[in-house]
Amino acid sequence: MASQNVIRKRRKMTDDHKSNGKGESEPLMVTSESSGDEEEAGIQRLLPVVEVQDETSWQIGLQVFFPYMIAGFGMVAAGLVLDVVQHWPVFEEVSEVFILVPALLGLKGNLEMTLASRLSTQANLGNMDTRKEQWKMIYGNIALTQAQAIVVGFLASVAAMVFGWIPKGKFDVHHGILLCSSSVLTASIASLVLGTVMIIVVIGSRKCKINPDNVATPIAASLGDLTTLSLLAGITSIVYKILYTQVWVAPLLLAVFLCLIPLWCVVSHRNEYVTEVLYSGWTPVIGAMVISSVGGLILDFAVSKFPGIAVFQPVINGVGGNLVAVQASRLSTVLHMSATPGTLPDDATLGCANPFKTFFGPGLSSRTVRVLLLLVVPGHLVFMYTIYFMPAGHISITLVFALGYLTAALVQVMILLYVATWMVPFLWRKGCDPDNFSIPYLTALGDLLGTGLLACCFVTLNSYGIHVMTRK
């Protein structure tokens, strides 16, 4: 109750002191008593008051649309790459590489989108307006994402071996070295490239007075899949070629990258902006990797039955993760602006969200959900027919297939947006920063739902004698 009074007090003070007499906004600090044990001890702390700006549907749509379309074409390019490389010798000989695909592509949700959301929140709070603070955030976040990428890349390769080899009852040492070294190198290099781009996008958006929550995560999605998949295909093929002639190269590279983990952890520990994430951010990242790996197991099975599914997998997964990341990032920013950790604003969602209110409510959150849902079908139509007119092979798009595919995509995004509506406030109320916890789980769930629903679409159409892989 005291927390709610604090929030009301902050809002009232914001309204009463919006200007400093010169027509400029004045930053305010209010003193409040903390909840729980701190409140009983009478300990007080200063809390910033930041006004949450309302946005119209047009403003949200215009800011999201262009990055969304750019992201979509990046995913289409990734799908075309996957459609080609699935026939490369390494992918045909070591089919477990397909299990790595969703897990490594999911790194953009685990790391880059989380980084984008974290930086967007700090930018909207005004904490990135000075060069000194920018540099502290840059090197701290780069070090953190490098440590996380190497660990997650290694664990993803272990999961691929477990999911791929236990059912077969056999183990190949050379294939294990191939998976581990390729996965770690791909994760580290992709994270460095994409993390740098995310930092540039957030700082540039702030200077252009564009809400980075609407721009940064779609840009991460646009570059993430294509960059990661291209690196995975190239690195895996190179390691595969030299593995039997210079067997020491791959283990040496793997050992070097693993030995760098303590260095990145020390740098992160000494940075005030990421030290907490260094200790608390592993659970969502590793949990999301496991969820994505299950999606990879589905993909490994589906590709063997329906080669045409490969070109659509990055698109349906990427679009779903892209849109839900925008919503999660926006919800997290609002909570950072209007509430203290562990407390919720009066209008926040408590418990399981009301589906009708989620999709048809009058608030900013529901308005954003409707805008994002309206982008699903037109976007996928454009992406689908772009794939059709490109020399991808395997694909013969009919009206029935298009309806099935669009239904799967719409169901995926609806589920993700509904889950995000209650997950973000739930994590905040538990004292977890949703910038670091929600997006990995949501994008991993998007990978699992997207791959599963897409496979169901192909299986269902095939069971009725409707073939979609006839064009060569």
Image (cartoon, helix red, strand yellow):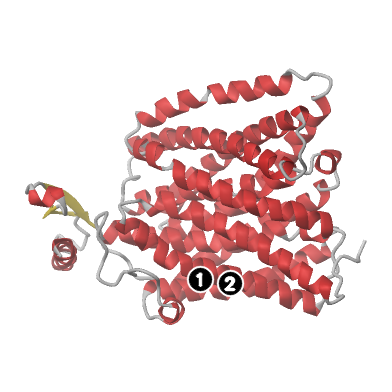
Q: Which one is earlier in the sequence, the residue at label 2 or at label 1?
A: 1
* Residue under the image location 50 percent in, 59 percent down: 325
The amino acid pointed to by label 1 is: Gly
Q: Residues within 10 Å of mark 2 (few under 14, many from 20)?
A: some
Callout 2 touching callout 1 (CB < 8 Å): yes
In this view of the protein, which residue sits in the foreground, 82 or 157? 157
In this view of the protein, which residue sits in the foreground, 60 or 79? 79
Q: In this orientation, does residue 127 appear?
A: yes
- Label 1: state its secondary structure: helix
Measured Cα–Cα span from mark 2 to mark 1: 9 Å
Q: Is residue 394 above or below residue 185?
A: below
Looking at the rendered image, the quarter that the C terminus falls into is bottom right
Looking at the rendered image, the quarter that the N terminus falls into is bottom left
* Residue under the image location 59 percent in, 37 percent down: 155
The amino acid pointed to by label 2 is: Leu
Question: Taking 171 as reference, is 352 left or right?
Answer: left
- Label 2: state its secondary structure: helix
* Residue under the image location 27 percent in, 63 percent down: 344
Q: In this orientation, does residue 216 appear?
A: no
Q: Residues within 10 Å of mark 1 (few under 14, many from 20)?
A: some
| Quadrant of the rendered image containing residue 212 | bottom left
Residue 303 location (% of width, % of height): 79, 55
Q: Quickly name the residue at label 2.
A: 375
Considering every residue shown, the one lying at the far left of the view is 42
Q: In the image, which disc is placed on residue 13? A: none
| Quadrant of the rendered image containing residue 349 | bottom left
Residue 163 location (% of width, % of height): 68, 45
Considering every residue shown, the one lying at the far right of the view is 472
Question: Taking 359 as reference, is 340 left or right?
Answer: left
Q: Quickly name the residue at label 1.
A: 61
Residue 123 location (% of width, % of height): 37, 50
* Residue under the image location 80 percent in, 73 percent down: 461
